[in-house]
Image: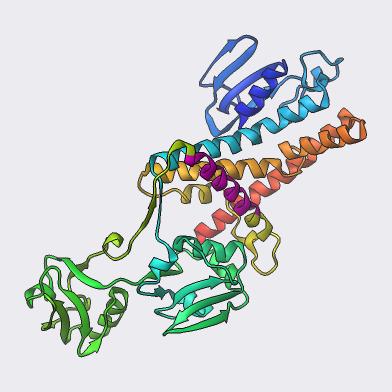
Amino acid sequence: HEFGHFAAAIIFKTRVEKFYLFFNPWFSIFKFNFKGTEYGLGWLPLGGYVKISGMIDESMDKEAMKEPPKPWEFRSKPAWQRLIIMLGGVIMNVVLAFLIYIAMLTYWGDEYLSTKEANKYGIRPDSLALEMGFQNGDQILYLDGESIEDFNKITITMVLNVVKNVTVNRDGEEVTFVIPDGSHNKLLSHKSKLFEVRIPFIAERFTEISPAKSAGMEKGDQIVGLNGESIIYYADFREEIQNYKNQDVIVTVIRNNDSVDIAMVLGDNGLLGVYPLSDMAEFFDVSKKNYTIAEAIPAGFSRTIGGIDNYLKQLKLLFSPEVKAYEGIGGFITIGSIFPTEWHWESFWRLTAFLSIMLAILNILPIPALDGGHVLFLVYEIVTRRKPSDKFLEYAQVFGMIILFGLLILANGNDIVRLFN
């Protein structure tokens, strides 16, 4: 982001006094001067900054601002050049996300579980999904009349589009139900999956102490019943078996196309001691598309535009009295929590692209002290041909900083409250 401002300033021969990775209050880890610019590494890991001569921002030199403008200063440049310099950071963020998406699509391609394929066995809703109106075995068809190609995007689509009506195939009939008021707010803070795909229960391996193995169950057996009741899906069986702790049960399996009843005694935990086959590729045809660089460019552009659109929808939800997304605003802890617990390069780059888009949009908001505030005043200057006074811009900068600090306190305060709760 800061390099975008830096590059635009250099192009228009505007002096850059400092360019830092991380902030450096009181001291720097190291620094050096090159062609009149101080480059350095700060010790406070909160992004970085660029200090441009003659620019009214949080790093401005008030004494220098009292002197007549110098040709190399930001304030001496034409309004259109100053506008490009201020937009440089946002443009760089968007370009970075675009390039990341191109690289990801070229290297990894695009892999997802289609909703059509996920509907093969129906869904298993959790408690919130049941409250919203979903039922076990539903096949999701439409959200507000639109089909969703990627199954994993159903939940986020429900949130961002504040979906009201869901159409499902339920026991062979097409059923449409209305999502109750207040559900979207609950969904925002929901930590677990709203629903998962159902899969058959096939024995993959056994625990060291396994009632099922001791009773004669074998790897590859497909569990289809319990005490004479047909239960063919793993999640359903897992829930039902908990009702038989310390009891004798008969588990029905399919082995080599034959039905076999296996009698066993469950322990205190009510478990068979069986790990199910969980490789999704064994049950579903996962959609996979590989891209050449030429194909990845338009696809990467589409993904970038989609990311911008989705984040704008998220901002819109902050002002929705129904969704109350403002209650979920978070700071550094929330940002850290979105990264997976295990390192995965694809996840890292996907999140980096998302954060780059997020930074672009937040910076372009028309708030003084943000790039968007400077852009707003520059557009006013270009349209009216009247430049706001330096004193007005200083006051606007202070006002904007107060707003930003307030948002910073709100976001990180929410994080702290959630930790204690």
Q: How many marks?
A: 0
At 40% from the left and 73% from the top, the residue drawn is 123
- Name the one closer to the observer, 384 or 148: 148
312 on left or right of 227: right
Q: Residue 45 appears at what percent x and percent y?
A: 53, 33
The quadrant of the rendering that contains the N terminus is top right
Is 367 included in the stretch rendered in magenta? no
Q: What's the residue at 65%, 36% (across, down)?
A: 90
Name the quadrant containing residue 246: bottom left
Q: Which residues are magenta?
A: 295-312
Image location (x, y in percent) of residue 130 = 47, 79
Residue 411's place in the image compared with 71, above or below, is below
Camera-side residue of 217 and 166 = 166
Query: Of 182 and 169, which appears nearest the observer?
Result: 169
Instruction: Tell whether 388 sits left or right of 213.
Output: right
The colour scheme applied to this rendered structure is: rainbow
Residue closest to the far bottom: 228
Is residue 298 positioned above or below 421 on the image? above
In terms of secondary structure, what is the magenta stretch mainly? helix
Quarter holding residue 325: bottom right
Quarter location, residue 271:
bottom left
**Which residue is pictured at 70% across the width and 44% down the height?**
404
Q: Residue at x 16, y 83 (%)?
A: 252
Q: Is residue 200 above or below residue 373?
A: below
Task: Give x and y (percent) for residue 86.
Answer: 72, 31
Counting from the top left corner in percent of width and height, residue 208 is at 11, 65
